Image (tube, rainbow, N blue to C red):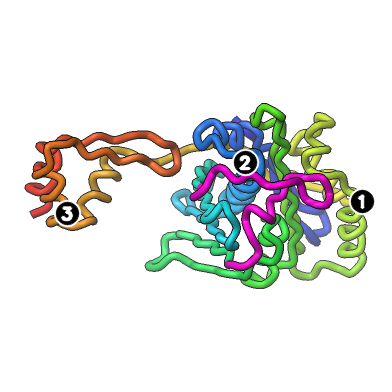
Amino acid sequence: MDKVVRYITQDGSAYVIACDSTQTVSELERIHKPSATVTAALGRLITACSMMGDMLKGKDDTVTLRMNGGGAAGDLIAVSDSSGNARAYVQNPIVELELNEKGKLDVSGAVGKNGTLYVIKDIGMKEPYVGQTPIVSGEIAEDITNYFATSEQTPSVCALGVLVNPDLSVKHAGGFIIQLLPGCEDEAITKIEDNIKDIESVTEMLSNNMTADDIAKRALKGFELDKLDESEFCYKCNCSRERVENALISTGIENLREMANDDKNTEVNCHFCNKKYVFTPEEIQTLIDNAI
């Protein structure tokens, strides 16, 4: 299980959430078998989604992050519950690109910069809250920072990192989000800006055996902190045969009749975990009978 922690400064000026998401992103890589660049992109997105999920208040609340910047990876989607348990999907898992000008995996090139980041929060209202902001860099962290500032009017800093081994396995993954709280003084803002200017990359901190707690404290270095909570999370898909049956029914009776009249079984694969659900023509007919 991975770990997420939350701290607040004792003066009430800022809040930080940090996590080590290495196992979650490793499971993502095992399921989807993406190229290194796509692992880095989708790994950053699911890490941000887990932290944003953990920030939700209701037990049954969920948050979905979706982005398509016109890059070769296509749609990237991550969904998290309020405990940070998350799942993810990418339209095109194999994207091979040259390293960028910094010698790093070209996440921005895979995601693209011409598109929109959608943040959908299902918090028990009649309709989900949908926020959307233009993709500013395709590097994910900058786009999350821009979303908080633009859509939620919350000055924030987001940092994300995924380190991929030569064999395409995941060595480290994690991130943090700092948010300024109402009434934050200029002195505190300057201190945070100085911290961010000098802070090591997330993957460098993880490579130096720093924990999620260590990363949170490093991000708000110089502040007296109170720990709010900590919890564990993992890659978790909520698909089930019942959900797939409901999805099939939603396609319409005529569509189901075509499946039932076919001699072949109907196979449905979950995009998030690749689990396969098989329905015989007789089972499809049962769905029709129950739906009528």
Taken as a whole, is the magenta stretch helix, strand or loop?
A: loop
- Compared across the picture, whether 138 is left or right of 203 comes to left
The residue at which mark 3 appears reads as: 255
Residue at 10 percent across and 42 percent down: it is: 286
- Decide if residue 253 is on the left or right side of residue 165: left
Three-letter code for the amino acid on which mark 2 is drawn: Thr
Closer to the camera, 53 or 47? 47
Residue ID at (73%, 55%): 158
Q: Quadrant of the C terminus?
A: bottom left
Q: Mark 1 points at which residue?
A: 198
Q: Can residue 258 be seen in this view?
A: yes
Three-letter amino acid code at disc 3?
A: Asn
Q: Which badge, 3 or 2, is on the more N-terminal residue?
A: 2
Residue 39, disc:
2
Q: Which of 220 and 240 is in front in this view?
A: 240
Q: What element carries label 2?
A: helix
Which is in the foreground here, disc 2 or disc 1? 2
